[in-house]
């Protein structure tokens, strides 16, 4: 017999409790989803990191690293899960999953005139003890990224992110705030009356819609894959003809993404992208792994020439129980770039680790600073030390 969670309702005084009106999650896909929209709105307004729906499990959301399940309802059955997937994606949503594909889309509640809430949705097929199903992870997206002034950004980063050419990489785990950091930097460029930037962005999907940022001298154009452009490659093929000053690539996941990003950077554009990695040295290891073997040496030299700033970020528990960022970073000077260009790819992590210790900010130093500022306690500090080894 399967264990069932208690269905005791949340206490009325619980500030995080969702008032369950008893409506269906989805009444009619693509038209009416009363409980889904109510629950997502509740999570968005609380500042939740993500909302989760999985077949045969209770719905839940995650806030400050803690999961809060909906215990007033039975776990999702196959029908409700299918309706949610088809509502978020379209009539063939479940068919796409069953065919081995995943789903990565934006979902919006409200209208531009009355105000909207936006969500980034990822859907993956799963297998459970009771059969096949779907896992839906929905990340609320803020209207605009948190301002740089509220992100504890180090002075060295603030002094170097406004490059006019070359490449900036922001790395970290999923949910570590990579897009938020780049988004805040982009907002600052747009608001600078002396900037005269023409910024173009390609992402899957676009998180922050920045055309609403008032700019006296700069412009921004954002394209979403596959809604606006079929592929990253198609976007890059047209990018050079648009004469941008800045190119933002949502994420480098494939060799062709990395090569195109490097080419944009060495062509005289300020280029920014994100990569999944745990430290700055491991970021460079990941970059090297994305360079095609057939053109490895030329790609390594071009990449080394393009690098200007590498930032790795993680969010850790602050003293108030919320999140605070820690960053390891390296401003890539000419000597470091020269060492990379003449080294083997296998040596890039060690060369980078030495450079971070000598002229950048390591996580060891970031921890010391956060402790001195009172943002974290010793328990959190020790946990991060163990994570980075």
Image (cartoon, rainbow, N blue to C red):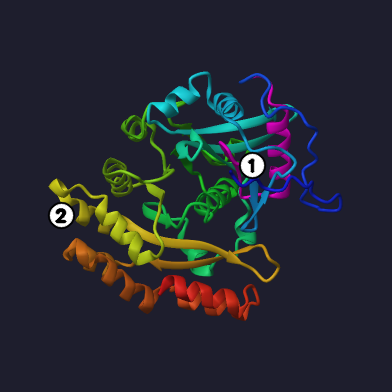
Q: Element under label 2?
A: helix
Residue 82: name its quadrant. Answer: top right
Q: Is residue 151 left or right of residue 309?
A: right
Q: Residue at x 41, y 49 (%)?
A: 273
Q: Residue 370: within the magenta?
A: no
Q: Residue at x 78, y 37 (%)?
A: 20
The residue lying toward the viewer, choosing from 117 and 386, is: 386
Query: Spatial distance from mark 2 to mark 1, Cα to Cα?
Result: 51 Å
Mark seen at residue 297: 2
| Number of numbered discs on residues | 2
Q: Element under label 1?
A: loop
Residue 115: name its quadrant. Answer: top right
Q: Residue at x 42, y 27 (%)?
A: 98
Q: Is residue 388 left or right of residue 266?
A: right
Q: Is residue 247 left or right of residue 49?
A: left
> In the rendering, at what x and y percent does residue 373 appear?
63, 77
Looking at the rendered image, the quarter that the C terminus falls into is: bottom left
Q: Which residues are magenta?
A: 31-58
Check the image and report above or below for 34 versus 376: above
Check the image and report above or below for 65 versus 251: below
Whether residues under marks 2 and 1 lie with C-beta atoms below 8 angstroms apart, the answer is no
> In the rendering, at what x and y percent does residue 144 appear?
63, 45
The residue lying toward the viewer, choosing from 236 and 114, is: 114
For the question of whether residue 240 can be seen, the reply is yes
Dot 2 alpha-carbon crowd within 10 angstroms: few under 14, some 14 to 19, many 20 or more: some
Residue linked to disc 1 = 58
For the question of whether residue 133 can be seen, the reply is no
């Amino acid at each position: 017999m399967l264990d069932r969670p208690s269905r005791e309702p949340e206490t009325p005084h619980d500030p995080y409790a969702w008032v369950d009106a008893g409506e269906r999650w989805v009444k009619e896909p693509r038209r009416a989803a009363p409980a889904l929209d109510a629950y997502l709105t509740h999570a968005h307004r609380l500042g939740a990191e993500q909302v989760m729906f999985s077949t045969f499990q209770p719905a839940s959301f995650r806030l400050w690293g803690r999961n809060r399940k909906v215990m007033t309802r039975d776990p999702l059955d196959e029908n409700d899960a299918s309706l949610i997937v088809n509502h978020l994606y379209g009539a063939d949503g479940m068919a796409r999953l069953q065919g081995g594909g995943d789903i990565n889309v934006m979902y919006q509640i409200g209208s531009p005139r009355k105000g909207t809430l936006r969500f980034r949705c990822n859907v993956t097929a799963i297998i459970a003890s009771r059969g096949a199903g779907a896992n839906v992870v929905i990340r609320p997206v803020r209207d605009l990224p948190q301002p740089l002034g509220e992100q504890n950004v180090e002075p060295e980063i603030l002094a170097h992110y406004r490059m006019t050419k070359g490449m900036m990489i922001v790395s970290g785990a999923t949910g570590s705030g990579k897009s938020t950091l780049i988004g805040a930097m982009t907002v600052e460029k747009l608001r600078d009356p002396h900037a005269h930037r023409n910024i173009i962005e390609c992402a899957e999907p676009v998180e922050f819609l920045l055309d609403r940022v008032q700019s006296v001298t700069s412009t921004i154009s954002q394209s979403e894959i596959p809604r606006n452009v079929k592929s990253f490659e198609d976007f890059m093929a047209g990018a050079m003809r648009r004469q941008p000053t800045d190119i933002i690539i949502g994420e480098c996941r494939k060799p062709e993404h990395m090569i195109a990003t490097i080419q944009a950077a060495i062509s005289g554009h300020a280029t920014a992208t994100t990569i999944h990695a745990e430290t700055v040295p491991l970021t460079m290891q990941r970059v090297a792994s994305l360079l095609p073997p057939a053109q490895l040496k030329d790609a390594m030299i071009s990449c080394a020439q393009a690098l200007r700033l590498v930032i790795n970020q993680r969010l850790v528990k602050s003293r108030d129980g919320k999140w605070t960022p820690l960053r390891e970073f390296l401003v890539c000077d000419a000597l470091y770039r020269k060492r990379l260009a003449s080294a083997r790819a296998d040596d890039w992590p060690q060369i980078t680790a030495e450079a971070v210790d000598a002229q950048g900010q390591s996580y060891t130093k970031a921890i010391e600073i956060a402790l001195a500022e009172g943002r974290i306690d010793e328990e959190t500090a020790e946990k991060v030390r163990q994570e980075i080894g």
